[in-house]
Image: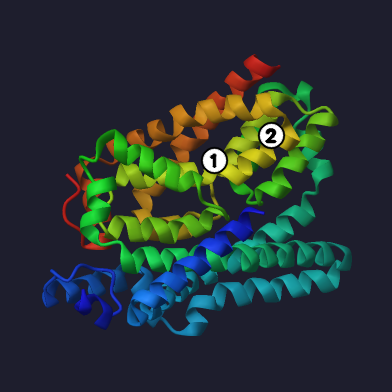
């Protein structure tokens, strides 16, 4: 649904831009392509790695790791798992909901969801090109510990 | 304005040729976007083809695993192709139509709370995977956004995307979503602030060399 809104925005934007200035519109499209192509090699590598990682560690394994009785170790395992994994939200949330039903704890799931979104080990090569290595590592480490705090707070509030 | 069009550039017209040359140089060394563009195809995609070959071998030995992995990979690829085209077109339009002065005014150093709010809302209005946010961050930094605001933008993109929140609420419940959102509203600016502080002067200069931008402090 939201994707359609984005397409509509992009098309309207392009139309207005084309109407106002053809040259600039062409420049914008060139820029769009170059930006996309600049991250493509790393993105393809990420897809392959994640494709295999999820095949090797299926949801079953994840379920065992994150059970409510897994405690602090489970939270840390969940945070690590979320850090190295990359999956779209519409895959991650149904997985998390299924895990919740099959007995995973709120604390573990919050850690998993939060690091999944904020910490990206596999995207470090792309992020490094943007912010440099120092800022990239700092941001990811800060986000990791922040996710642990989120996990504890959510475990207390919801658990 | 016309100069900008001529060199397909996102830099301001005010830049001198020397600066321009210097930037190309730096980008080349660090492996930024422009530098990458000049690298040969095989070198850039080498890692991908190597992994692909390894994957094919693994798939022949363990067909079951190979098939699942292939499905997963193709699934990600399809998602990318469906979501990314409008995102990158909007990125291109942003780059061409919003000039440096405007970007600095609204999200640069000294834009204060307004800048934080704009960065947060821009990131939340996004869709698509986090890796697509980094090209946006590149454009924002080049146009003079403060690092803190760009980090807030990245944080919001990763965590508080509006379509994702709706989805989260439907699968995890409203309470889970709301508590996490409340924590994110505090946490994202906090992480951005801490990251910028932790970098210090030398760290900020390292980023400046990536962009040949005016000093951030």
Q: Where is residue A117 in the image (x, y as percent from the top left)?
A: 57, 43
Looking at the picture, does residue B179 appear above or below residue B37?
Answer: above
Q: Which residue is drawn at 73% across and 49% down?
A: A91
- How crowded pointer 1 is (Cα within 10 Å; few <14, some 14-19, many 20+) is rated as many
Corner quadrant of residue A132: bottom left
Residue B169, numbered label = 2
Q: Mark 2 lies on which chain?
A: B
* Disc 2 secondary structure class: helix
Front position among marks 2 and 1: 2
Q: Which chain carries label 1?
A: B
Report whether A137 appears left or right of B160: left
* Disc 1 secondary structure class: helix
Instruction: Please tell me which of labels 2 and 1 falls first in the chain.
Output: 1
Report whether A34 appears left or right of B73: left
Camera-nearest residue between B55 and A150: A150
Q: Where is residue A85 in the image (x, y as percent from the top left)?
A: 64, 49
């Amino acid at each position: 649904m939201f994707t359609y809104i984005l397409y509509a925005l992009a098309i309207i934007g392009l139309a207005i831009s084309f109407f106002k200035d053809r040259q600039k519109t062409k420049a914008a499209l060139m820029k769009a392509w170059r930006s996309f192509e600049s991250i493509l090699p790393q993105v393809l590598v990420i897809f392959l790695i994640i494709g295999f990682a999820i095949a090797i560690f299926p949801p079953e394994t994840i379920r065992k790791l994150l059970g409510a009785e897994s405690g602090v170790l489970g939270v840390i395992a969940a945070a690590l798992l979320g850090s190295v994994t990359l999956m779209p939200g519409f895959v991650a949330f149904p997985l998390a909901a299924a895990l919740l039903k099959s007995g995973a704890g709120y604390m573990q799931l919050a850690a998993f969801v939060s690091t999944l979104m904020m910490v990206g080990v596999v995207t470090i090569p792309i992020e490094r090109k943007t912010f440099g290595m120092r800022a990239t590592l700092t941001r990811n480490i800060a986000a990791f510990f922040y996710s642990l705090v989120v996990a504890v707070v959510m475990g207390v509030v919801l658990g | 304005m016309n100069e900008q069009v001529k060199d397909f550039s996102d830099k301001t017209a005010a830049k001198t040729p020397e600066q321009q040359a210097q930037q190309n140089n730096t980008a080349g060394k660090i492996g930024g976007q422009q530098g990458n563009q000049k690298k040969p195809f095989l070198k850039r995609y080498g890692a991908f083809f190597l992994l692909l070959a390894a994957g094919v071998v693994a798939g022949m030995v363990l067909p079951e695993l190979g098939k699942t992995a292939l499905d997963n990979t193709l699934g990600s690829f399809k998602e990318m192709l469906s979501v990314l085209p409008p995102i990158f077109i909007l990125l291109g339009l942003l780059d061409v139509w919003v000039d440096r002065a405007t970007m600095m005014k609204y999200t640069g150093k000294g834009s204060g709370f307004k800048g934080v709010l704009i960065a947060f809302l821009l990131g939340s209005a996004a869709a698509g995977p986090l890796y697509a946010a980094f090209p946006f961050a590149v454009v924002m930094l080049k146009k003079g956004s403060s690092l803190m605001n760009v980090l807030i933008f990245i944080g919001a993109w990763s965590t508080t995307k509006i379509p994702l929140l709706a989805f989260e609420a439907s699968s995890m419940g409203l309470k889970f979503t709301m508590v996490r959102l409340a924590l994110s509203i505090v946490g994202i600016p906090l992480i951005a602030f801490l990251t910028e502080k932790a970098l210090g002067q030398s760290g900020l200069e390292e980023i400046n060399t990536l962009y040949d931008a005016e000093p951030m402090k």
